[in-house]
Image (cartoon, rainbow, N blue to C red):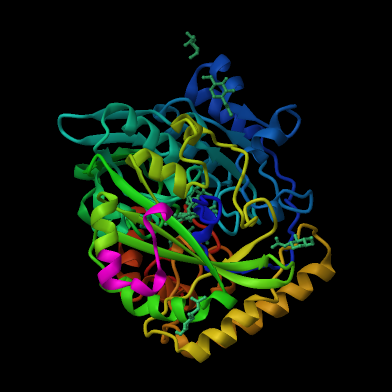
Amino acid sequence: MKTTSLSCSSLFIFLVILSCSSWPAQSHGHHDFLRCLSLHLQNNTEISSIVYTPNNPSYLSILRSSIRNQRFTSASNPRPHVIVTPMHESQIPAIVLCAKENGMQIRTRSGGHDYEGLSYRSKVPYVVLDLVNLSEITIDVEQKTAWVQAGAIIGKLYYKISQTSRTLAFPAGACPTVGVGGLFSGGGYGPMLRKFGLVADNIVDARLIDVEGRILDRKSMGEDLFWAIRGGGGASFGIITAWKLNLVTVPATLTIFSISRTLEQNATELVHRWQYIAPNLPDDLLILISIGPVNSSTGEKTIQASFGSLFLGGVDTLLQVLEQRFPELGVKREDCVEVSWIQSALFFGGYSIKESPQVLTSRNPQIRSTLPIIRFYFKAKLDYVQEPISVSGFEGNLYKIQQLAYWDESGAEASGTSISWVRKLYSYMTPYVSKSPRAAYINYRDLDLGVNKEGNTSYAQASIWGLKYFKNNFKKLVRVKTTIDPSNFFRNEQSIPLRYSK
Ligand SMILES: Cc1cc2nc3c(=O)[nH]c(=O)nc-3n(C[C@H](O)[C@H](O)[C@H](O)COP(=O)(O)OP(=O)(O)OC[C@H]3O[C@@H](n4cnc5c(N)ncnc54)[C@H](O)[C@@H]3O)c2cc1C
Ligand SMILES: *[C@@H]1O[C@H](CO)[C@@H](O)[C@H](O)[C@H]1NC(C)=O
Ligand SMILES: *[C@@H]1O[C@H](CO)[C@@H](O)[C@H](O)[C@H]1NC(C)=O
Ligand SMILES: *[C@@H]1O[C@H](CO)[C@@H](O)[C@H](O)[C@H]1NC(C)=O
Ligand SMILES: *[C@@H]1O[C@H](CO)[C@@H](O)[C@H](O)[C@H]1NC(C)=O
Ligand SMILES: *[C@@H]1O[C@H](CO)[C@@H](O)[C@H](O)[C@H]1NC(C)=O
């Protein structure tokens, strides 16, 4: 069985490359910020071990340590005046107060996977609050709950859960290096979505530090704010330091398969059929598709559709279901492997299932993905397809994808070519995808959808992107934002605006 063809990156549907936008950081004294911190933390030893300014030799390596998109590593990108890496939640209120007092914004970074780099890039003077050292995970096996600090990556969460029981699990994303701070606050989905819903549905408590430096939990923040930080993105409301999760119970034996079909092997018809079959499969069964260019055995370029699957049960049952529901796919017993849940996490993370699960805890693993978007320059776009696309529609689409190449150079020429390719694809897709508004997912952030004005943006301006991500929930998010952060301290290019701002 080939496990290489499907990996965490296959959850991306359309990949786009944009030219690098650069905005030089303005010079601004950060000394007052540091002085303020040393007053409030009252411990100089501690400060020097959690604060990095540009003249610290580790500054650049820490800044880059969780930048996931090479578009944003070059020197033309803005850099923070200070990086702070708190060791404890209690150190964060002082960071908020001192940033506020000194006119600096805070960019909170957990896993660093933001598509537009908003967790470490800003046009205005700013501090990166990097939660890399807030990553404790405590599991209560009896209660089937876990507290996970916001700086942990989901791979570490999976690994820790797997150490306590073979049948406890958590339904988050595929890629192990994604941070729980960003993924969970944007809603979050993964391979067990059909059975257990979104990550947000499985969060039962949270800890958040607000603009006044108060440490709130679900009870003290209230249900509206607790709702907002589970889908509205965390960055508009404060700093989330930890989540409490309800763990789910899965069978001891799950089954995975991954099979690939090229255009010559009827990929187009199979993908077309899949649209009708996949939504109606039992909840226990997920079948995903990733589509990309490959070289055929005769060395010619072609397109391949890879079908990757997770079934919450054994292979015998799976084969019965497939025989009934999707015989055209032609899955055979030898295409399938029975695994534990943590092995399925290795599979979706792009690893061999024979690998030690501990590799999932690595923040900087060797990337083995066949789709090299993590290593290279990427920009992704997401569409929701609401009606199945016709075979002829797919033919046009798949042949367009054939023109796709991945660029591993930053040259303007390369990105120019890809931009025009992507624009064609995006407009080609228009008739097939959601409309009014064309929907988007906050965790696949796309600044092309619109950005806030600097300072206090207007509600109307923010609605341009806000309604695409949130539809009718946007209004309620604005109300919550106005209550919890009335001075709009926590803001970025796509943060929720204040209610009455003009
Ligand atoms: C390779 C890859 C795979 C992915 N796979 C999936 C997937 O399977 N499912 C899915 O749903 N999404 C997936 N995503 C999208 C992912 O959920 C989002 O990019 C998410 O925002 C990343 O979270 P992070 O903590 O790693 O990112 P960061 O860049 O650290 O943060 C993202 C945003 O959240 C804010 N933020 C981060 N931490 C906090 C905090 N503690 N408090 C307040 N605000 C905070 C940041 O300021 C920023 O605005 C993937 C992305 C990539 C690049
Ligand atoms: C300062 O912090 C360090 C590390 O946390 C601790 O060991 C030390 O006791 C603290 N000193 C004072 C004076 O609080
Ligand atoms: C995180 O904490 C460890 C000590 O526990 C320290 O060695 C490391 O440098 C810290 N990382 C950062 C980025 O501050
Ligand atoms: C492709 O589909 C056609 C008819 O739908 C079928 O006859 C043919 O055998 C299929 N080819 C492959 C390689 O599966
Ligand atoms: C196809 O083959 C060419 C030439 O050997 C190689 O450069 C390219 O990377 C291959 N493409 C894929 C998708 O494997
Ligand atoms: C934004 O509006 C709020 C509320 O009126 C105000 O307190 C704050 O200073 C404004 N911020 C900016 C950057 O204009």
x then y, percent, for residue 305 = 53, 69
Instruction: Determine which quarter of the picture holds residue 53.
Output: top right
Residue drawn where x is 59% and y is 77% of the image? 264
Does residue 235 appear left or right of residue 84 in this picture?
A: left
Left or right, 51 with reference to 356:
right
Query: Is-magenta flag for residue 63?
Result: no
Q: Is residue 189 visible?
A: no
Q: Which residues are magenta?
A: 321-335
Q: Residue at x 26, y 30 (%)?
A: 165
For residue 118, say whether it is visible: yes
Q: Which is more toward the observer, 374 or 108?
A: 374
At 43% from the left edge and 26% from the top edge, which residue is drawn?
88
Q: Quadrant of residue 122?
A: bottom right
Total count of labels: 0
Residue 368, given in percent of the width and then of the height, sits at 61, 46
Residue ranking furthest to the left: 142
Q: Is residue 123 depicted above or below 380 in this figure?
A: above
Q: Main secondary structure of the magenta part?
A: helix
- Magenta highlight on residue 329: yes
Residue at position x 45%, y 72% in the image: 440
- Which residue is more in the foreground, 168 or 133? 168
